[in-house]
Image (cartoon, rainbow, N blue to C red):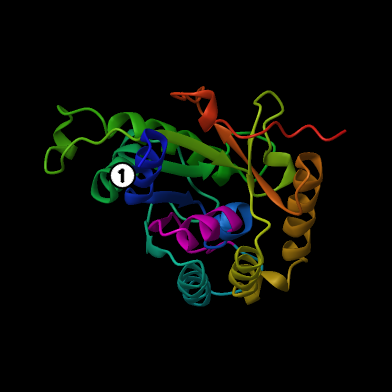
Amino acid sequence: MSSDSAQYGSELAAPILAFGAHPDDIEFGCGGVIAAETQAGRKAHFAICSLGEAASNGTPELRAAESRAASELLGATCEFVQLDGDGKLEIRASHAIELAQIIRKIRPSAVLATTWCDNQHPDHARLGQLARDAARLARYGGLEELKGLEPHAIEQLFFYAVTPEGEPPNVAPILIDISATDVINAWQAAMSAHVTQAATRDYIDLQLNRARLWGARAGVAYATALFPNEPLLFQSLRQVGKGARQF
C-alpha cells in the first residue's frame, strides 16, 4: 500500500462531525457530502443545536423525527443539543465548551458547520463561530469543564452554506464531487424527509440547482462547496485534485 493510500485509509477510520443550527441544515447544506463519505465507509455524526421551534411549519417533535429519519438515510447518527432554542442562539463560552465536549466524544478528523456570514439566519452565523471556538477548545488539556474527556485536535474545519447568501465571498471553496447516482439519491431522500419544511418553499430544488451550478463550474454533474477555515496541507501534489475551472 502506498503512503498516500495508507493516509486515506486512516482518514476514513476517523468520523465526520457535522453541526447544524436547525433540524434540516446539515441535510440541505452538505447532505451530498455526508452521503459520499458514508457510502465510502466513513462514519458520520450530526449534532443538531435546536428543534426548529421557531419554524413556520412543523412542531419540534415532528422536526426531530424528520431529522432522525434523514440522518439514517445518509448513513449518519444524530443527537440534539439544547442551547438557547431556534432563533435565540447566542455566542457564549459555555456553548463553545458544550460543543467541544461533543468533539472530544466523537473524535472526528473533520468538522463541518454552518458559515459565519451575517446575511443569513442568525443562528447559522453564530453556530459557525461557536463551532470554530469549540474546535480550538477541544485541544486544550487544562480546561476544567473538559477534563473528563481526552483532548482532541481535528484535522480540518469546513463550513457549509445552507443558502447562497451564506457563501463567504472572500474564501476560495473546495468542491466535493457528489455526482454519483447513489449519492444524489440518498441526498434527495434525506432532504425529502423534511416534509414540514417543503410546505414553506422548494428547498430541495434550490439545493439541487446550487449543486448543479457548482458542478458545472468543475465539469461534473453535481458538486458541493465547502469553505476551509485555514489553508489545507498536502504531503504531495498527487493528493491534490484537479482545478475546477472549465470556462
Q: Which of the 4 image quarters holds residue 91?
A: top left
Q: In this view, does 202 lie above or below 132?
A: below
Q: Which residue: 46% across, 35% down?
A: 157
Q: Which residue: 83% across, 35% down?
A: 246
Residue 149 is one of the magenta-drawn residues? no
Task: Tell me if I can see residue 25 in this picture.
Answer: no
Q: Is residue 77 above or below residue 220?
A: below
Q: In this view, does 43 lie above or below 130?
A: below
Left or right? Give the position of 192 relative to 209.
left
Left or right? Give the position of 19 relative to 163.
left
Residue 147, percent from left and from top: 12, 37
Q: Which residue: 72% across, 53% down?
A: 222
Task: Tell me if I can see residue 86 in this picture.
Answer: yes
Residue 50 is one of the magenta-drawn residues? yes
Q: Which residue: 35% across, 38% down?
A: 96
Q: Nearer the viewer, residue 92 or 158?
A: 158
Residue 244, percent from left and from top: 73, 34
- Which range of residues does the magenta coloring cover? 32-54
Quadrant, the C terminus = top right
Q: Nearer the viewer, residue 192 or 49?
A: 192
Question: Which residue is farthest front?
Answer: 1
Amino acid under label 1? Ile
Q: Name the residue under label 1.
A: 103
